[in-house]
């Protein structure tokens, strides 16, 4: 009987191992996030509405929608279960709402000017409009992970123009 050729395994790619670990973590975290009750969801929508109403009120505007309208809009948006910026999974338990074009930069206080995204992107987006932030996300994807994390940390700490923190 002829000898079997010796099998050789290709060398393991450390980036592939890291990607698998991240995918497992996202899957595990996504499973936990699915357990949000409808009562929690309704409270979150009411808090988002109240924050949006106060923000519009400071600019002397009335919102052209109410809590049930916002709730129905969010439910429609959550049918696409990924963040429009980073493509991370978003669920009823961990979604956030941002303006496509912030009102300080000429955006309107309408449902058409809102986006449902992940909490991390909401924290980083700040005064950028959605196109600028999407381009920033695409650029950051080409950076090594440590640099991306450090840049994100610095973005979260930046002073907001027009507040007392900005000097």
Image: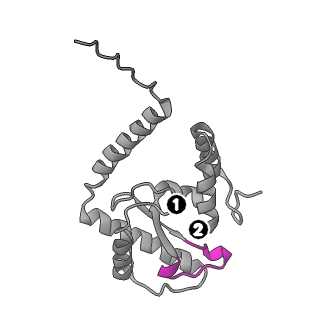
The residues bearing labels 2 and 1 have C-alpha atoms spaced at a distance of 8 Å
Left or right placement of residue 52 versus residue 165 in this view: left
The answer to whether residue 39 is seen in the rendering is yes
Give the residue drawn at x 55%, y 74%: 55
Q: Which residue is mark 1?
A: 85
Task: Name the residue furthest front.
Answer: 1
Q: Is residue 163 magenta?
A: no
The mark tally for this picture is: 2
**Secondary element at image label 1:** loop
Task: Name the residue furthest right.
Answer: 167
Q: Is residue 110 magenta?
A: yes
Q: Which residues are magenta?
A: 100-113
- Within 10 Å of the Cα at label 1, are there few (<14), some (14-19), or many (20+) other Cα atoms? some
Using the image, determine if residue 13 lies above or below residue 160: above
Left or right placement of residue 121 versus residue 6 in this view: right
What percent of the width, then of the height, locates residue 87? 46, 57
Using the image, determine if residue 112 lies above or below residue 48: below
Q: Which residue is mark 2?
A: 130
Give the residue drawn at x 29%, y 16%: 4
Quarter of image, res 17: top left
Please state which of residues 60 and 107 is positioned toward the viewer in this rendering.
107
- Locate the C terminus by quadrant: bottom right
Give the residue drawn at x 63%, y 53%: 139
What percent of the width, then of the height, locates residue 146? 59, 37
Of the image marks 2 and 1, the number of the one nearer the N terminus: 1
The answer to whether residue 126 is seen in the rendering is no
Give the residue drawn at x 63%, y 40%: 147
Disc marking residue 106: none
What percent of the width, then of the height, locates residue 150? 62, 41
């Amino acid at each position: 009987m002829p000898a079997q050729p010796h099998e050789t395994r290709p060398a393991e790619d450390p980036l592939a191992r890291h990607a698998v670990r991240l995918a497992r973590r996202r899957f595990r975290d996504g499973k936990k996030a699915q357990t949000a009750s409808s009562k929690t969801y309704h409270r979150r929508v009411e808090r988002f509405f109240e924050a949006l109403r106060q923000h519009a009120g400071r600019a002397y505007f009335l919102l052209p929608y109410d809590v049930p309208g916002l709730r129905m809009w969010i439910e429609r948006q959550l049918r696409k279960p990924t963040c429009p910026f980073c493509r991370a999974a978003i669920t009823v338990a961990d979604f956030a709402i941002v303006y496509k074009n912030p009102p300080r930069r000429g955006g309107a206080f309408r449902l058409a000017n809102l986006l449902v995204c992940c909490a991390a992107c909401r924290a980083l987006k700040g005064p950028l409009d959605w196109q600028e932030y999407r381009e920033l996300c695409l650029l950051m994807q080409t950076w090594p992970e440590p640099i991306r994390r450090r840049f994100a940390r610095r973005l979260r700490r930046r002073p907001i123009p027009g507040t007392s923190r900005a000097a």
